[in-house]
Amino acid sequence: MKTCGNCGLGINDNNDLISCFKYKTLSNSQEDKTSCSYFIEKVLEDDGEPLPPIQHLFLVEEQFKERKMKISINHGLRM
């Protein structure tokens, strides 16, 4: 399930709250984020620790760039 607690951009805060690295908001760790464009599952390093939120943000933004590039290339080939 896509929740703030499972998101790589979430930073654990006090009282079961998660601070979003991207949007700078506080949310309940179990809040449903199915509609959040920036949700990304936590990516673990070799030592089992998750990547820092800034690296997760870079990964999401790279995915956006790849999608945009595919769309513009595909639309350019249509006649």
Image (cartoon, rainbow, N blue to C red):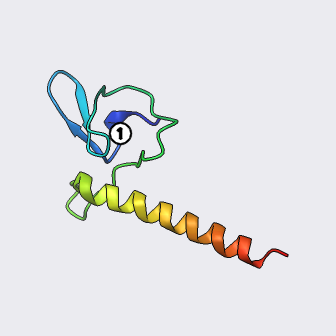
* Residue at the image position 22 percent from the left and 24 percent from the top: 16
Residue 23 relative to residue 37: left or right? left
Instruction: Measuring from the top left, give residue 23's x and y in whole percent.
Output: 31, 40
Q: Position of residue 56 (x, y in %)?
A: 32, 56
> Is 19 rendered above or below residue 42?
above
User: Percent x, y for residue 10?
Assistant: 28, 41
Query: In terms of secondary structure, where does tag 1 sit?
Result: helix
Residue position for label 1: 6
Compare residues 22 and 10 and report the one nearer the observer: 22
Residue 50 visible in the shown view: no
- Residue 73, quarter of picture: bottom right
Q: Percent x, y for residue 63?
A: 47, 62
Tell me what residue is drawn at x 65 percent, y 67 percent: 71
- How many numbered marks does the figure carry? 1
Kind of residue indicated by mark 1: Asn
Residue lying at the far bottom of the rendered structure: 77
Query: Depth check: 32 or 23 in front?
Result: 23
Q: In percent of the image, x 42 and y 47: which residue is there?
A: 38
